[in-house]
Image (spheres, rainbow, N blue to C red):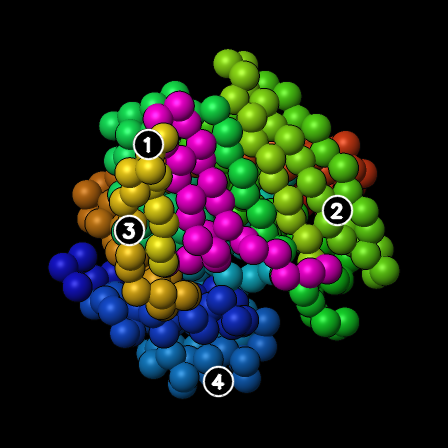
Amino acid sequence: MEAPALRWGILGTGWIAERFADALHRNTRQVVQAVGSRTLDSAQRFAAQAGAKTAYGSYVELVADPAVDVVYVATPHNYHFPHARLALEAGKHSLVEKPLGLNAAECAALAELAQRQRVFCMEALWTLFLPKYDVIRQLLADGALGEVHTVIADMGEHFEPGHRILRPDLAGGPLLDLGTYPVSFATWVLGRPESVLALGSPAPTGVNGQTAAILRTASGQVASLLTTLFDNTPTTAVVAGSEATLAVDGPFYHPGRFTLKGLHADELVYEEARVAHEALYFEAVEVARQIAAGATESALRTMAESVVTMSVMDEIRRQVGIVFAEEEDPARLGGG
């Protein structure tokens, strides 16, 4: 509530946009100023539900609105890059749903554009802005685990036929959607890996169905990661070190519980309310604070860190054989 109140433009009217707007209303002084959709009817329905003052039947109109301070891009994965570019080129500060683009080149292009425009841009990886991750960040920085050797994380969920994650035309498959969480967790703890090994298997619709990956850093640290759209997995995360092991309950990317257990059975437990996606407001107030301070990015999730995560996923996709149709368009990065 103490964060400076900004006027938000919501670009997209899907599931995550609804939860984001609701989280702002319940927990902050942020204002949902306007919403943009492909159709005016969709925008008007969302605006009525979210209490937005203005509804637009196009994204161009939304980013041109002088009453909008910051744009939240919440369209499907393969549209994040062009819609974020649209907002940035209009001079709007932007919070872009994860991942920023389909590949590292697109993420880097957005980082460069934001710097040229001198506006704020950040990937909406909401997990890293939760209170429990602030505590984990401090434990890692203080060396509470000793020398970290191992990271283990999984993210698996069963999806019924017809879900968007199964659609090739929406850059489907688990990696961009679910896999971003374990991969970003590993790179957050360990940094950029020196080598990546990956295997995957397809889903009946032609998208990737599941992928397992091993990452190794130059110093020999290892991460074991899994993502799948076939089954519900524990969705937990572990960081193991020479002095203690940190185990994050599932779903590890949500608000909730983790345990720090020492080698000699000493155990500390952290608890917080399991409010699920209502906690999306933490990333929003970080954006508001940084914009008010004149910053162009957040130290909690820099654009460079987003590029590192995506570069790892690029290599995983190369080894598994996952190619998105949009990547074959030479004009995409050039803005054509």
Spot occupied by residue 208 in the image (x, y as percentages of width and height): 77, 50
Q: Amino acid at mark 1?
A: His
| Contact flag, marks 3 and 1 (Cβ < 8 Å) | no
Which quarter of the figure has residue 42? bottom right
Secondary-structure class at tag 3: strand
Spot occupied by residue 257 in the image (x, y as percentages of width and height): 35, 55
| Contact flag, marks 4 and 1 (Cβ < 8 Å) | no
Give the residue furthest to the top: 219
**Which mark is first along the chain, 3 or 4?**
4
Residue occupying the point 42% across, 57% down: 254
Give the residue furthest to the front: 264
Q: Which residue is mark 1?
A: 264
Q: Amino acid at mark 4?
A: Arg
Spot occupied by residue 121 in the image (x, y as percentages of width and height): 39, 44
Spot occupied by residue 194 in the image (x, y as percentages of width and height): 59, 19
Whole-angstrom CA distance, mark 4 to mark 1, is 57 Å
Which quarter of the figure has residue 153? top right
Q: Is label 3 or label 2 in front?
A: 3
Q: Which residues are magenta?
A: 230-255
Q: Which residue is mark 4?
A: 45
Whole-angstrom CA distance, mark 3 to mark 2, is 40 Å
* Residue closest to the eye, 198 or 168: 198
Give the residue furthest to the left: 2
Q: Residues within 10 Å of mark 2 (few under 14, many from 20)?
A: some
Q: Amino acid at mark 3?
A: Tyr
| Contact flag, marks 2 and 4 (Cβ < 8 Å) | no
Location of residue 111 with respect to 206 vertically, above or below: above
Q: Residues within 10 Å of mark 3 (few under 14, many from 20)?
A: few
Question: For residue 231: magenta?
Answer: yes
User: Which mark is on residue 199?
Assistant: none
| Contact flag, marks 2 and 1 (Cβ < 8 Å) | no
